[in-house]
């Protein structure tokens, strides 16, 4: 039996793509291996959002070239494939395939013909969703892409280049995938998209569906107990969607809505044209709709021209909104983006100092929130055992990690009393 090795880098969309590829290959009679030297086909499913992520892929490829069986096929799929294109073959001449995020279904073609060099980085739209077989079993948390690509064109971001302009999948396709997930083991559905709340699909009769319609359509499924979506663009948080947090109890009280910076000047240069007050108003409306809602953000520090004053405004907004579960990054110049050509690029040491300061602030807010949960009983979803096997890892409705002593009859969805907290996680025990 032929074996495949797949390693996924980057965002949830890539995790989903990796699951689809693995399921397609197992469906064709191959077995998954975690040992590169034993694999007949080796796939790196890649992320290009920061230079470090791309560098990681090429150093991994160098290692694979030496470790693989001589006749094993190897290649890259995903955003680095689209970013590097034919250059990838120049850097690593032995590569067999370079397939962009919307053409990885073409992988099937080379399984028959090991001598082909396959380059396809077209933005083929939604074809891959139709051409890949359904997964036979859904994970407990089913990630379901509803749209792909982004029309926002933030000046730092390579995604509009790698994943293209926004395309929304049809309402029926998303509902069909959700039903399939519910029937094959899913308890939580997470709708995915680079700009998930930009979802907009008009059917042949002219009726337009938004994300709120999708949530309303799948909420009655009895197997599905929790619903969430990621990642949202602030100005597309329309009232119909905000209202879902009031009316739909299965929608988790947690929203990832990246602000990126707290400085109006930096936001303008990032081409994120919203007023801070508008962002704050949206958060206020969300809190009226769902008083216990928590918000998370992504931040970029050291964007070209960012002053100490600009950075101070980022710290202030982080404290004001009290973000939880957030990510912060040093600005990384990317090809095909406008910001890479802007003047006043920030030196690495300043970026590093700002990142450390922002992380310290975010960690403190997270610790305070985690501590405020001690004594509460929360309904949590099991992710599986930890590395030692002595504990189970659960996720709270706010996506915090909660560690519980392992127990053979632990339910997937359990009421857990939170007994302790630190900045990274919670501890808890099963409650009645
Ligand atoms: N440099 C640093 N961080 C970036 N992101 C996107 N592009 C860049 C870049 N060039 C971050 C943003 C985005 C997250 C997925 O990655 O914060 O929300
Ligand atoms: Fe990139 Fe901005 Fe689109 Fe997010 S909204 S994917 S950061 S261009």
Image (cartoon, rainbow, N blue to C red):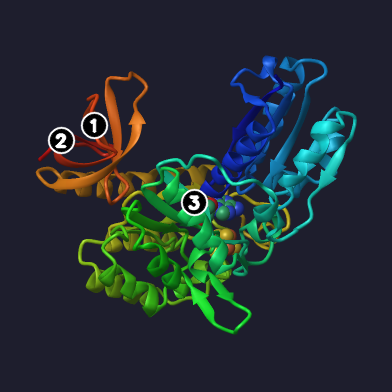
Which residue appears at 36% of the width and 77% of the height? 277
Q: Which residue is mark 3?
A: 180
User: Which residue extends farthest bottom?
Assistant: 206
Q: Which of marks 1 and 3 precedes in the sequence?
A: 3
| Pointers 1 and 2 in contact (C-beta within 8 Å) | yes
Label 3 vs label 2, nearer the camera: 3
Look at the numbered disc 1 and give the secondary structure of its residue.
loop
Q: Is mark 3 within 8 Å of ligand 2?
A: no
Q: Is residue 98 left or right of residue 381?
A: right
Quadrant of residue 408 in the image? top left
Which residue appears at 68% of the width and 28% of the height? 29
Q: Which residue is mark 2?
A: 430
Label 1 vs label 2, nearer the camera: 1
Which residue appears at 30% of the width and 68% of the height? 245
Q: Vertically, is 398 above or below 215? A: above
Q: Is residue 370 left or right of residue 261?
A: left
Task: Report ligand 2 position as a quadrant.
Answer: bottom right
Look at the numbered disc 3 and give the secondary structure of its residue.
helix
C-alpha span from label 3 to label 2: 30 Å
Q: Which residue is mark 1?
A: 410
Residue 209 position in % (x across, y down): 51, 75
């Amino acid at each position: 039996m032929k074996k495949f090795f797949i390693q996924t880098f980057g965002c949830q969309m890539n995790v989903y793509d990796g699951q689809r590829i693995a399921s397609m290959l197992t469906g064709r009679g191959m077995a998954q291996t975690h040992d590169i030297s034993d694999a007949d086909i080796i796939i790196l499913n890649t992320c290009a959002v920061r230079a470090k992520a791309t560098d990681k892929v090429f150093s991994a490829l160098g290692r694979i070239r030496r470790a693989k069986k001589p006749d094993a096929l190897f290649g890259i799929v995903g955003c680095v494939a689209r970013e590097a294109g034919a250059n990838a073959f120049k850097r690593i001449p032995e590569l067999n395939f370079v397939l962009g995020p919307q053409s990885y279904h073409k992988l099937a073609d080379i399984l028959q013909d090991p001598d082909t060099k396959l380059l396809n980085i077209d933005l083929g739209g939604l074809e891959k969703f139709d051409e890949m077989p359904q997964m036979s079993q859904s994970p407990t948390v089913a990630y379901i892409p509803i749209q792909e690509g982004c029309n926002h064109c933030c000046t730092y971001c390579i995604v509009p280049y790698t994943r293209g302009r926004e395309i929304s999948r049809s309402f029926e396709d998303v509902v069909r995938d959700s039903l399939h997930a519910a029937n094959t083991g899913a308890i939580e559905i997470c709708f995915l998209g680079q700009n998930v709340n930009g979802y907009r699909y008009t059917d042949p009769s002219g009726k337009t569906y938004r994300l709120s319609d999708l949530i309303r359509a799948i909420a009655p499924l009895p197997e599905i107990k929790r619903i969430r979506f990621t990642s949202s663009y602030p100005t597309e948080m329309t009232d119909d969607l905000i209202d879902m947090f009031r009316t739909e109890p299965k929608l988790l009280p947690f929203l990832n809505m990246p602000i990126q910076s707290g400085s109006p000047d930096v936001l303008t240069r990032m081409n994120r044209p919203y007023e801070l007050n508008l962002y704050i108003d949206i958060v206020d409306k969300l809190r009226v709709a769902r008083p216990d809602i928590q918000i998370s953000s992504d931040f970029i520090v050291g964007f070209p021209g960012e002053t100490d004053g600009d950075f101070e405004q980022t710290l202030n907004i982080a404290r004001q909104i009290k973000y939880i579960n957030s990510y912060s990054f040093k600005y990384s110049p990317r090809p095909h983006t406008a910001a890479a050509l802007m003047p006043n690029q920030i030196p690495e040491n300043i970026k590093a100092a700002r990142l450390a300061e922002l992380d310290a602030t975010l960690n403190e807010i997270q610790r305070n929130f985690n501590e405020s949960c001690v004594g509460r009983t929360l309904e949590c979803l099991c992710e599986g055992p930890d590395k030692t096997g002595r504990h189970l890892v659960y996720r709270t409705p706010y996506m915090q990690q909660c560690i519980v002593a392992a127990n053979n009859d632990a339910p997937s969805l359990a009421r857990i009393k939170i007994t302790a907290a630190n900045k990274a996680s919670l501890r808890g025990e099963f409650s009645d």
